[in-house]
Image (tube, rainbow, N blue to C red):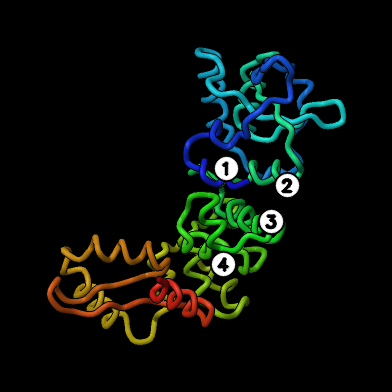
């Protein structure tokens, strides 16, 4: 498993353990698509059909550039990784698909499927959060280990997992892309579920932006005061890059006031757990 951890970010081939289940050293074969069963542990629940159609067109023109990964189960091949390619091959009308066959345990097969998916940029945020949760609950990995395994910042992992605490209707709305991840994170600032749902309804009804939501949540004082504060904040653009780095690193909104020589840093937190997480990030060695 440690070999797979070091291989992340180098492509699917790097995730595949050495050694073949075949005799004679064969590692890639063409398999009849009707003999391949879907992955029952597939973490991705939504697939972009337009993207699959585009990939199918590419396959018709140039063939399958990268084999899928399967394992033997009950006399059939079970898909482990490469479901988008497999679906695209079907759309392209091909009778077979190149595949690498390896002997994986159930745990290893699930882990590879999760890793392949969370490293894709278009993975739905709820699918991504649920994938991290499965790594946490089924593999007993902590946040640092998940970060290492999927090649993403630990703060990103923590923030994605926080999405799972939202009410069911909001999580469904995020999965269906009615709201963005930014909207969902802003709603986490509210400490009661019914308040989150009330504001979520306003987002849907009035097509509120993330900035609108943040303004409504933080609104203590009149709009004029807030507008003045924003104007003062946006005057100094030389600190913008530093502010963005801090925001990414800490996983929360950060504002810098002043100049490069003197000023103050404002860090937002939205719950006691969030505060403890930010303190841990700032104080870690």
Question: How far apart, in angstroms, are the residues tagged by discs 1 and 3?
Answer: 16 Å
Residues at marks 1 and 3 touching, judged by CB atoms closer than 8 Å: no
The answer to which of marks 4 and 2 sits earlier in the sequence is: 2
Disc 4 versus disc 2: distance between alpha carbons?
Answer: 24 Å
Identify the mark at residue 107; answer none if there is no mark: 2
* SS at circle 4: helix
The residue that appears at 21% across and 76% down in the rendered structure is 257
Q: Which residue is mark 4?
A: 162
Q: Crowding near pointer 2: few (<14 within 10 Å), some, many (20+)?
A: few
Which residue is pictured at 15% across the width and 78% down the height?
A: 262
Callouts 3 and 2 close, C-beta under 8 Å: yes
Q: Nearer the viewer, residue 159 or 218?
A: 159
Mark 1 lies on a secondary structure that is: helix
Outermost residue, right direction?
74
Q: Secondary structure at mark 2?
A: helix
As measured in the structure, the alpha-carbon distance from the residue carrying label 4 to the one carrying label 1 is 29 Å
Q: Which residue carries the number 1 mark?
A: 3
Figure check: 116 above or below 222: above
| Tag 4–tag 1 contact (CB < 8 Å) | no
Disc 3 target residue: 139
The residue at the far bottom in this view is 221
Q: CA distance from mark 3 to mark 2?
A: 8 Å
- Label 4 crowd bin: few (<14), some (14–19), many (20+), radius 10 Å: some
Label located before the other in sequence (1 or 3): 1
State which mark lies toward you, 4 or 1: 1
Q: Number of marks in the image?
A: 4
> Mark 2, mark 1: which one is toward the viewer?
1
Left or right of 260 in this view: 92: right
């Amino acid at each position: 498993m440690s070999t797979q951890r070091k291989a992340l970010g180098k492509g699917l081939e790097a995730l595949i353990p050495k050694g073949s289940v075949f005799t004679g050293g064969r590692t890639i074969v063409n398999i009849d698509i009707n003999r391949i069963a879907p992955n029952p542990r597939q973490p991705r629940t939504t697939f972009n059909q337009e993207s699959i159609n585009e990939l199918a067109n590419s396959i018709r023109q140039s063939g399958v550039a990268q084999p899928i990964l399967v394992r033997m189960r009950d006399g059939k091949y079970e898909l482990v990784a490469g479901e988008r390619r497999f679906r695209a091959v079907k759309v392209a009308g091909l009778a077979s698909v190149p595949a690498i066959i390896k002997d994986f345990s159930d745990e290893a097969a699930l882990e590879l499927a999760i890793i392949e998916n969370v490293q894709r940029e278009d993975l739905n945020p709820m699918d991504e959060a649920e994938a991290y949760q499965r790594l946490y609950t089924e593999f007993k990995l902590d946040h640092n280990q998940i970060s290492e395994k999927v090649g993403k910042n630990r703060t990103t992992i923590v923030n994605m997992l926080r999405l799972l605490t939202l009410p069911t209707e909001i999580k469904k709305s995020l999965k269906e892309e009615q709201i963005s991840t930014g909207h969902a994170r802003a709603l986490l600032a509210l400490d009661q579920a019914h308040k989150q749902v009330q504001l979520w309804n306003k987002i849907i009804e009035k097509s509120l932006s993330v900035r609108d939501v943040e303004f409504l949540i933080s609104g203590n004082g009149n709009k004029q005061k807030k507008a003045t504060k924003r104007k003062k904040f946006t005057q100094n653009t030389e600190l913008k890059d530093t502010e963005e780095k801090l925001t990414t690193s800490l996983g929360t909104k950060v504002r810098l006031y002043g100049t490069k020589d003197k000023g103050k840093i404002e860090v937002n937190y939205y719950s006691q757990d969030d505060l403890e997480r930010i303190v841990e990030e700032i104080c870690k060695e």
